[in-house]
Amino acid sequence: MKKQKIKVISPKGNSGNPRRQFIKLGGLAVAGAGLMVACSKEEMAMQPTTPPNPDAGGDGDETPDEGNGIFDLGEGDLGVLNYAYALEQLEADFYTKVVNGFYKNCSQEEKTVLTDLYYHEVNHREFFRAAIGAAVGDKTELMLPDLEFDYGDFDFGNRDQVLNTAKVLEDTGVSAYNGAGKLLENPTYLVLAGKIVSVEARHASAIRTLVNPGSADFAGDDVVTVDNGLDLSKDPSEVLAAVAGLGWLQTEFTARFLP
């Protein structure tokens, strides 16, 4: 039987992602459609009435690139959007690789979850592409370019490698949005970021259930702070250092204006 390939959505097109069906994980019902709540087509089309100011620092220099040929994410809301766009590009690319070659003995439940995550992350990536594009207009040099990744000897055919890496990516994504929320100035972006992080948190819990079925790991103490019941929060510098540590990112960029 010929293996089915999922077509990667065109960067310039709409995702066209249909609402996903309900899925179940070892008795724990997870609403696939619910996972998508924060990213409905209508909401993804939202744009703030005030776009991010590329020159939020007021130095008159709207060009993140200082001439060294390396893109900088920028400052203010634009910097945060480019930062989120980078993370979503990584997640979307990773799940694209996963769903186009499911590891051996991948169960139907696992395929369903991983496929849902693929669609969601591609939607997130395209949302940020559209939002940044609308904000910068013809100043496309202010938008983070398409990133290139090289997974080296990572074995996409190995279930443990795939699921444990997905767990790290989703946990990191949640902590990244939690840490970046305070940096956003436009309330519309803050609302959208809050919606997206809720989806990322559901991703994390779903993957954790796949890794360790029947456990309480879906909300483990390693990600939910026992003292206050809140999820972890990390600054962009921490998150980007962790991403760089994977060794997958081939496109250089800097984040000089983000904490």
Image (cartoon, grey):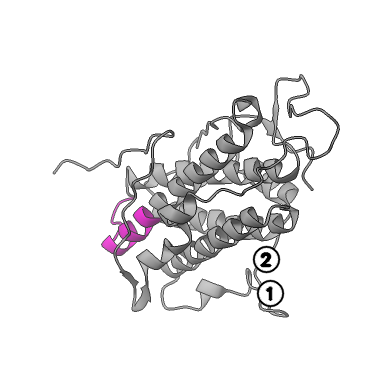
For residue 90, say whether it is visible.
Answer: no
The answer to whether 155 appears left or right of 255 in the picture is: left
Q: Is residue 99 above or below residue 178?
A: above
Query: In the picture, residue 206 is in which quadrant?
Result: bottom left
Q: Are marks 1 and 2 in contact (CB under 8 Å)?
A: yes
Q: Which residues are magenta?
A: 103-116
Return the x and y of residue 19 as percentages of the image width and height: 32, 59
Residue situated furthest left in the rendering: 1
The residue singled out by tag 2 in the image is 232
The answer to whether 91 appears left or right of 23 in the picture is: right
Instruction: Report helix, strand or loop for mark 2.
Output: loop
Q: Is residue 78 above or below residue 168?
A: above
Marking on residue 225: 1
For residue 197, say whether it is visible.
Answer: yes
Please state which amino acid type lies under the numbered disc 2. Leu
**Image quarter hosting the N terminus:** top left
